[in-house]
Amino acid sequence: MTNADYALNLFRDLELLDKSLHWLRRSFAICSEIGMKSEFTEEEYDAIETLTGRYARTSDLLIQKVFRSIDKVEFEESGSMLDVLNRAHKRGLFGSLEEIRTIKDLRNRIAHEYVKGDLEAIFVQVLEFSPRLFDLAARVQAYCSRYAPTGY
């Protein structure tokens, strides 16, 4: 593959990320209105479940696909996820490794089975970390604009 091919793949990944962010923002707005309370309706649980799933998918797209695509455009050997994250951190794409670890850990909690009692705790964290994920995605999109293929 040529560098132009890698850049095109990066921008395809960024398009997927953008669509995912759209739906995550929509769910975030709905769930921010719900807020925390002692009891939720079934419809509210559905909205919370949608939010957590969209958060997991968006963080996965960003960390697993986009960060690796940036490495390919910049001729970096992919290596381990830790290598990918260290390079993304050196690029200034996020503030600290602890921040990205928290985003990833929350994604992993969502992806694995949890009982109803855990949903409320996860919901609080997703409400807290979604704006951080939005900011992270914006920094990544701005960084990647330098590699925009013709027509983007």
Image (spheres, grey):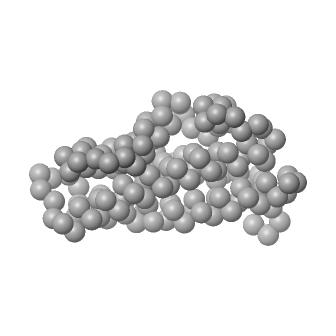
Q: Residue at x 77, y 38 (%)?
A: 76
Residue at the front extreme of this rendering:
113
Residue 1 on image: x %, y %? 86, 54
- Residue 129: tell me if it is visible: no
- Residue 55: tell me if it is visible: yes
Examine the image and state in which quarter residue 45 appears. bottom left
Viewed as shown, does residue 141 lie left or right of 49? right
Count the numbered circles shown.
Answer: 0
Q: Residue at x 64, y 33 (%)?
A: 80
Residue 149 on image: x %, y %? 80, 61
Residue 152 on image: x %, y %? 75, 66
Q: Residue at x 49, y 65 (%)?
A: 22
Residue at the left extreme of this rendering:
38
Residue at the right extreme of this rendering:
2
Viewed as shown, does residue 105 lie left or right of 78? left
As rendered, which of 98 and 109 lies closer to the eye? 109
Q: Residue at x 76, y 46 (%)?
A: 72
Residue 19 on image: x %, y %? 54, 66
